[in-house]
Each structure stands twice: as C-alpha cells, then as structure tokens.
Amino acid sequence: MLQIKKFTFNPVQENTFVLFDETGECAIIDAGCYFENERLELDAFIAEKQLKPVRLINTHCHFDHIMGINHCKAKYQLEFECHPDEAILVEQAAEHGDLFAIPMEPVDAPDAFFEEGDKITFGNSYLQVIAAPGHSPGGVVFYNPEQKILIAGDVLFYGSIGRTDLPGGSFDRLVGNITSKLLTLPEETVVFCGHGPETTIGFEKKNNPFLT
C-alpha cells in the first residue's frame, strides 16, 4: 500500500513528495529541496524509514521543482526522469531562478524520459503517467487508480489551476486537459498539489472557479 510524505521546500514553498510502500522502495517526486537543512530533512526521513529511493521523477521542470535534483542524483545514484518536452526548462533553470532573485546552480540534464501511458514502477506499486500540458510544455500528473491518488504538480490546485503566463503555457490547453483527463477520475481521488494543501477531484468539480 502506498504511503505519501509531503515536504514543503524552498523560497517558493513547493511541495516535494516521497511515495513508498511495504517493500521500502520509494519514488522522489519534484525534488525541490534548496537549502541545506531541507536536503538534510529529506535525507533524514528516508534514513529513518529505511527507504531505498529507486525513482527520481518530475511532474514538470520549472526551477522550483528541480532545485534538489542534483542532490538526489548524487546521494542516491538515481536517474532524473521527466517528459521530453520539459528538458528545455531544465536547461534554463538557473536563468529562471535569477528572474525570481533565487540563485541556483545549473541542474543536470534529464537521464531518461517518460510519455503519456507509461507506468512508473517501484516496489509493489506503480503510477500512471497522464500528460496534462498547459502550465508547462510537457507537464504530467501521476495517478494510482487502486488508491485513487493523484500527484498533480502545478496542473491543479485547491480552488485554482496552474499559471499559464510562463513560456510554453496555454490556458485553453491546461483547462482542456484538466477537464478531459482529471475531472473524469473518481470524485474521491485525493489530489496532492505542487503548492498548497490537498484537495479532491469531487471538490474541484463543484467549487473550482476556473472549472465550473
């Protein structure tokens, strides 16, 4: 059974997730640890739970979601995986950080890519890759149908949606993907967002002003 640990990291208050099951294998999603104490917090949790990180995956690659990639790659000998259309954002991460007055080192290029329909496996668990660009050019969400868990990145928030005014963004594309691919999931699906609190598909269908 999947368990989820959420960390809120870096000056942009980004949510990083560790998903793990009874085997001890885990996936690190959207590693955003920026400060040394944040990297230590992540590592301490993994050590305390005796977890073995085996996947390092991203919903998308805006700079605040990849601040901890280099650390996790080196610490746990992992390959960095994302959608191929996000690779350009990795190249530009340090430049984008400067625009927000948040200096950061260049991030290593992705080592592997996934596409819509792929399965991210670890331990006895898996996540389905669902493409949902619009906030970013190759943004995805990760869905586990057995437990009805959705790791949504910056696609869908509690009462809101991802901003679409950044390069590669499109409001119509984002709303179309949310409507056709996310709101069709079971209403009890718990949505773990890239910023802010959790929500559910049912709540957003009824209450999200961008979608109702």
Image (spheres, rainbow, N blue to C red):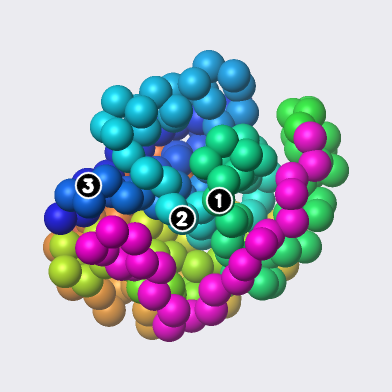
The kind of residue tagged 1 is Leu
Q: Amino acid at mark 2?
A: Arg
Left or right of 17: which side holds 9? right
Q: Is residue 3 visible in this depiction of the protein?
A: yes
Q: Quadrant of residue 113?
A: bottom right
Above/below status of 102 relative to 193: above
Quarter of the figure with the N terminus: bottom left
Residue placed under numbered mark 2 in the picture: 55
Q: Which residues are magenta?
A: 105-127
Out of 40 and 5, give the one closest to the viewer.
40
Residue beneath label 3, please?
A: 3
First reached walking from the N terminus: tag 1 or tag 2: 2
Q: Indicate the quadrant where residue 103 lies.
A: top right
Q: Mark 1 highlights which residue?
A: 78
Horizontal and vertical percent position of residue 9: 51, 30
Q: Residue at x 74, y 49 (%)?
A: 108
Spot occupied by residue 82 in the image (x, y as percentages of width and height): 58, 64
Q: Residue at x 38, y 82 (%)?
A: 180
The image shows residue 13 at horizontal and vertical percentages of 51, 32
Residue drawn where x is 72% and y is 63% of the image: 87
45 in relation to 68, above or below: above
Horizontally, is 1 left or right of 7 in the view? left
The answer to whether mark 1 and mark 2 are in CB contact below 8 A is yes
